[in-house]
Structure formats: C-alpha cells, structure tokens
Amino acid sequence: MVIELLKCQVDPDLREQYLQMDAEVWTKALAKCPGFLGKEVWLNPEEASEIVLVIRWATKEDWKSISEELLRQTEQKFAQQMGSTYQIVSAEYQVYQKGVRSEG
C-alpha cells in the first residue's frame, strides 16, 4: 500500500467549503480509479487553516497511472469552486513491512 499525503493550507473561513468540495469533486473522481483504497481527512486542532488528506492506494503504479487528463479536469472543476484560496504541499509515503525493501 502507498499513501498519498496532501497537506493543504486553506483560509479558515473557507475550510468547510473546501472540505465539501473536496469530497464532491476529488474524492468522487479518485474513487473511480483502479487501486483507490480510501481517503481520510485530518484537521489540525491547533491550526484551523491546515488540512491533511491521507489517500490510500493499493500500489504506486495504481496511483501514478491516473491520467493527466483526469487530474487536469478534476483540478479545473475544483478550482472553479474554490479559486486560488488554497495551497497544497504533497508527499508520498509507503507502509513499512519488515523484510520488504522500500523503493528509492
């Protein structure tokens, strides 16, 4: 399993709108992709502008095989609703399994 971890900075006044649009636009689109295992949204209780999205993929290949066109269309739809009110810093993690050598 591979974790796509997205840390987002959002205007605290727009957080609920961001969460709703993320579920309606991004989660629905990703749920149709092969290898999508689920998504969790974590809120930082100390910092209202911080949202962490934890997206689980069966394999890195599943995650990276999402078409550029789907990503572009989904981001365009999302941005139409949210504008430039957010910033994303992304990272990638892999579940540690003893005896299994990690990539990279």
Image (cartoon, rainbow, N blue to C red):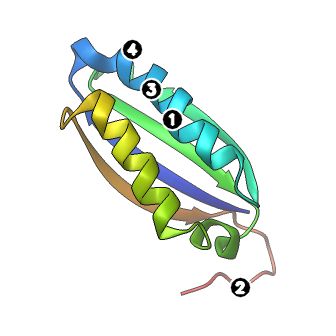
Q: Which residue is mark 2?
A: 101
Total of numbered circles in the picture? 4
Q: What secondary structure is marked by label 3?
A: helix
Q: Which residue is mark 4?
A: 16
> At label 3, which amino acid type do we have?
Met
Q: CA distance from mark 4 to mark 2?
A: 40 Å
> At label 1, which amino acid type do we have?
Val
Q: Which residue is mark 3?
A: 21
Label 4 or label 1, whichever lies nearer to me, is 1
> At label 4, which amino acid type do we have?
Glu
Q: CA distance from mark 2 to mark 3?
A: 37 Å
Q: Which mark is residue 25?
A: 1
Q: Are marks 1 and 3 in contact (CB under 8 Å)?
A: yes
Q: Are marks 4 and 2 in contact (CB under 8 Å)?
A: no
> In the image, is residue 95 above or below residue 19?
below
Task: Please name whichever residue, 70 or 10, is drawn nearer the observer in this view of the structure.
Answer: 70
Which residue is at a point 18% across and 38% down the rendered structure image? 84
* Badge 4 or badge 1: first in the primary sequence: 4
Task: Please name whichever residue, 50 or 29, is drawn nearer the observer in this view of the structure.
Answer: 29
Q: What secondary structure is marked by label 4?
A: helix
